[in-house]
Image (cartoon, helix red, strand yellow):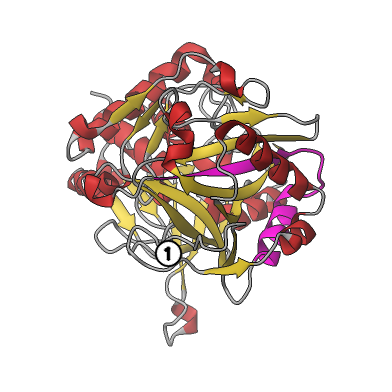
Amino acid sequence: MKKYTDKIVIIGAGVAGINAATKLVDNGYPGELITIIDKGKDPYQRPHSEVMLGFAGAGLFSDGKYCYLSNAVGGHLTKYCGEEKAQELVDEGMEILKRFHPDPSKIMYSAPTEQPNFIKPYFNLRLAPTYHIGTNYLHDMGKKWFDWLEEKGINFIWETEINDINFEEQSIEYKINLNLPFPNKSYGYEFYDKLIYCTGKSGIDLTQKLIETHKLEFESKPIQIGVRMELPQKYVDNLVDIAYDFKLYQKPNDEVSLRTFCTNNFCAYVAEEVTYNMKSFNGHSFKDEDYRNDMTNFGIIMEIKGIDNPFEWSKNVVEKCQIDGKGLYYSPNKTRKPSQTSEKNELNVVELDNLDLFKDIYGKYAEYIINFINDMDKIFKFGNDFGIYIPEVKHLSEEVLVNYQNLSLNQYPNVYFGGDSLSARGIAVSAAQGLYIGSSLL
């Protein structure tokens, strides 16, 4: 058996990070040589309010969709490793989820195969086969996975924020606890032989800092911003029967394209996210009749190209959507009120009487979303029986350029990028990238 001696540090206990670790220890890498650092908590201590931080990252409290390989969704995995290898990695990631799922028989699979004629005048339907895990199973799955990794000897460092990384000295500076009364002890250092960098959306500022400090080569990513729409399930049943996680798509011009994203049905709840201390919205989907509310929600996301410094632009838009620490909600039906979360908590929203503020904040891009909703109404006839939560945003840093063979940095071959740090945008692609990195270290 090969003898491993390199110390591996993984930054981020999200989907990419824990899949990389799983790949390594599954194949004989000593867990004692692997350390995972995360800003959040382990799955036993992590509250629902910490959507973005902690074990399994945003995936733990998500809707639990694992989109099968498709160039129509997620990051561009195939450009790194080709179609065949990418499919193999996605399959492997699904098998790991099944291994730790408390009841794999409850996982639902949908695979739309054709474009329905009734949407064609206004939309294309992106055909993306998807596994639906269920929000209510994710937390127990996370606990089982975490316990297994600990049993394998992996060292976790929780509630620790990375302050800086020195790639030349192979050192990580982190904040221990800024509330300690000893300022000289508020920082610590970790050293590595190999570094796997898999921060989520909450780590984008650090990624930007590393790009600037180390002059890393990168390409800018388009803006991903929009709203989350909610309406009674009955209006879209004819589409749900064809594509449970439907992905409607429009491309008005070369600058802007729009798509529905992360569709939740039957037992569907709007969820709050907090990134950079700002509210945005997402959705949850349960596989339990006790949660059934016969509602559907989905993101309407615009991909906007050609804007300088897209990360700062989208952050600025999200900041303008905040009123007294709350996001925004609008419905043309004044009897329709904002939903509760799946934990029966009130959503933190300010109800708008009209869309004037939305138009002021989003500028010319507001009309694209309004037109998208109007086109949906022409097909599904929901009239004013809907609401939108503002904003939904996918914060993306610039994508660093990596070696396609193993996702290592071109300038620093012992540093590997994955997950949201490499614009994965989804559980399946994040898992696959983590597995790809892990396999390259064996």
Does the rendering let one see residue 318?
Answer: yes
The location of residue 198, given as percent across then percent down, is 48, 44
186 within the magenta span: no
Give the quarter of the figure containing the C terminus: top left
In front here: 225 or 252? 252
Figure quadrant of residue 285: top left
At 59% from the left and 50% from the top, the residue drawn is 384
Q: Nearer the viewer, residue 78 or 386?
A: 386
Q: Residue at x 42, y 58 (%)?
A: 51
The residue that mark 1 highlights is: 160
**Image height of 86 relative to 421, above or below:** above
Q: Residue at x 32, y 46 (%)?
A: 135
Residue 432 visible in the snapshot: no
Q: Secondary structure at mark 1?
A: loop
Amino acid on which disc 1 is placed: Thr
Q: Is 87 above or below relative to 267? A: above
Which residue corresponds to the image point at 67% horizontal and 26% vertical from the top-left? 122
Residue 178 place in picture, x, y as percent: 47, 78
Indicate the position of residue 373 as horizontal and vertical percent values.
64, 42
Q: On the rendered image, what quadrant is the N terminus found in?
A: top left
> Relative to residue 441, is residue 305 drawn left or right?
right
- Magenta range: 295-321
Task: Verify whether residue 297 appears in magenta.
Answer: yes
Residue 250 figure quarter: top right
Residue 243 in the image: above or below residue 186: above
Q: Is residue 253 left or right of residue 159?
A: right
Label 1 packing within 10 angstroms: few (<14), some (14-19), many (20+): some
Q: Residue furthest bottom?
A: 181
Q: Is residue 201 above or below residue 368?
A: below
What is the total number of numbered labels drawn onto the structure image? 1
**Residue 40 % position (x, y):** 39, 61
